Amino acid sequence: MALTGQQLIAGNFSNESSESFRAINPKGKSELDTDFYEATENEINQALEAADNAWSSYRTISPATRADFLEKVADNIVALGDELIHRAMAESGLPEARLVGERGRTVGQLKAFAAVVRDGSWLTASIDTALPDREPLPKPDIRRMQVSIGPVIIFGASNFPLAFSVAGGDTASALAAGNPVVVKGHEGHPGTSELVAKAISDAAVSLGIDPGVISLVQGRSYTVGQALVKHPLAQAVGFTGSLRAGRALFDSASARPNPIPVYAEMGSINPIFILPGAMAERGDALAAGLAGSVALGVGQFCTNPGVVISEKSSDQESFIAAAKTAFEEIAPATMLHPGIKAAYDKGCSTLTEEAELLASSSTAANDEDTEAAAALYSTDAKSFNSNDRLTEEVFGPSTLLVSADSKDEILKIAANLDGNLTATIHGTEADLEAYSELVNILNTKVGRIVFNGFPTGVEVCPSMQHGGPYPACSVSNSTSVGAAAITRFSRPVAYQSFPQSALPDELKDSNPLGIWRLVNNELSKDSV
């Protein structure tokens, strides 16, 4: 497919702008072909109006058709073949194997949400039948279920050009819930975004679904994103990126005459706590595992472990020595784009000023290829607790070792943490018993607690929680991964005393969809 560089609005390409930009290949920093045009205010309005018009029909199509749509999108993405992978490689610097795997995750997410739609349990359908003879007042018939909310704005993420971008988990869950989507393509991979958006659009057309169900707008400017969030027809926002950008979108959405929710995943330092028993048992193995986790994807994962806390001991000294060697052996690698590399360098400069640099990649990074060297820093618990600059996320392959004098200092560090996506505990059963307060503290700080593992790698499954208290996320009780992500883009509606003919199929006595429902406080698939 030849790239156009234009907006894709309800199945049609559009360009009303003279302002354009090009993607940059981070390896060599060369401009790629194709000019991509900034979306105009009129094009943004067209996309939202098309989405709103499509909503009236899309929200009422059968669950089977909606599931077929998601599966067709998955098939179309696979059918793009090497063209998609090679374009994504050129725009992101990510290796082929990583992107092939990410495509598999993207396709898997779409098919998983198709299964969720068919199953229907996400609707939490509930029926309480009438009790007309109840005293002193009759009880009416009340039935409740989740419904779609309307056009959703999705922002593509820089670090996952497929799995958290145009057809990523946010888009998949919004479409699964019955909402049209307008995607703001990430300026780092606009060509990849166009290819995937066309795959979604073609899937809609092939099934007779209103093409306004998906639109893609492009742009590097701040104004494009703000215009999308402020548009009166937008009903919710999904975002993955920096705290600064996520907070700006959240503030804009909150300041609207009709505020809308922004599900923003922003910053996280993902602390790791290594307790004394684990340190004594396997310090060298933990050092190697830490280096591997920090270096994975050049540290460009939202679950990158940015802080490691442990108690001073001779075992800790051996661990630090092993970690220094492991970090020196990490080869520099290409980051996603020069902007992310510049931010990483700035973060490392701050750490160099505020902490001790223990080790870095022994091979020099090649700036022409936007490479980043790994870096290992060290500080003490008192400095960490008193210096906010040490608690800021550094997005890239670095981490900070924090040495505590006692268990109480470790617990104080945990209590002072801001919200995070994850926290990890390495320990023995005896450690967990001795540090039982730590688990209770971390329960209030993160969305996922990992035991004897590393936080990088987010399994896509119904039990996954990928979210956390602010500033990790703007809405702490939501997840952007797993089946529960669909609930972000729906809301409950109750139907009271409705005739059977006017009820949605999900709530009719006969249960024509065969879904699980809570009927008079008992789960059942039977007719009422």
Image (cartoon, rainbow, N blue to C red):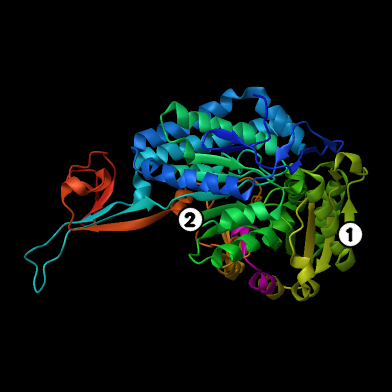
Who is closer to the viewer here, 456 or 7? 7
Where disc 2 sits, the SS reads loop
* Numbered-mark total: 2
* Image x and y of residue 129, in percent: 16, 57
| Residue at mark 1 | 357
Q: Which residues are magenta?
A: 412-429
Q: Is residue 417 above or below residue 395?
A: below
* Image x and y of residue 525, in percent: 24, 43
* Image x and y of residue 107, in percent: 54, 33
* Image x and y of residue 335, in percent: 79, 43
Q: Residue at x 78, y 48 (%)?
A: 291
Q: Is residue 468 above or below residue 1?
A: below
Q: Residue at x 81, y 54 (%)?
A: 344
Q: Let me know if residue 133 is in the magenta part.
A: no
Q: Earlier in the sequence, mark 1 or mark 2?
A: 2
Q: Amino acid at mark 1?
A: Leu
Question: Seen in the image, is 508 located left or right of residue 31?
Answer: left
| Residue at mark 2 | 235
Question: Seen in the image, is 299 located left or right of residue 179?
Answer: right
